Image (spheres, rainbow, N blue to C red):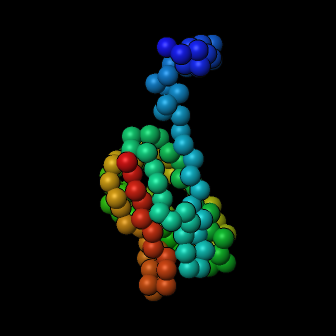
Amino acid sequence: MTFSRVAIAASLFILGLSPATAQLATQSVTITVWSFGFAPRPIHLAAGRPVTLTFVNRSGSSHDFTAGAFFAASSISAGAAAGGEIELGPHETKSVTLIPRAGVYPAHCSHFMHKQLGMNDEIIVN
């Protein structure tokens, strides 16, 4: 074991964390929503790693983030994605914490014509 690995392992031990616990620390990803787009594009997540997705609507209009297959395949531990979507009012922020399953999932805004105007995205989990 190299010195740096020993130092990291010792630091984790002192903090009371095992390397496995440290690897499962919750990742945070902010998904920005506006008329008519999402960012980041695409969204990259690690399979099996807890993540808190924070959806921030910068628009003065309502939008949603619909990804039915993604939310159905994920294990949600906090927040909700009823019907596979996160509904956002004007300038609203919502979060959901989950453990995603590997795959490639489509996402879009289901409001009338929003998908066609550019509110679509892809979630890549590997």
**Can the viewer see residue 87 in this picture?**
no
In this rendering, position of residue 48 left or right of residue 55 = left
In this rendering, position of residue 111 left or right of residue 29 = left
Q: Residue at x 56, y 52 (%)?
A: 29
Q: Residue at x 54, y 43 (%)?
A: 27
Count the numbered circles shown. 0
* Residue 52 to residue 36: above or below: above
**Can the viewer see residue 46 in this picture?**
yes
The x, y position of residue 44, in whole percent, is 46, 54
* Residue 62 to residue 20: above or below: below
* Residue 30 to residue 16: above or below: below
Quadrant in the picture for residue 70: bottom left
- Is 26 or 77 nearer to us in this picture? 26
* Residue 126 to residue 5: above or below: below
- Is 96 or 70 nearer to us in this picture? 70
- Is 3 or 26 nearer to us in this picture? 3
Q: Residue at x 45, y 50 (%)?
A: 45
Outermost residue to the front? 2
The x, y position of residue 119, in whole percent, is 49, 76
Quadrant in the picture for residue 121: bottom left
Q: Residue at x 56, y 79 (%)?
A: 36
The x, y position of residue 9, in whole percent, is 55, 16
The x, y position of residue 112, in whole percent, is 45, 85
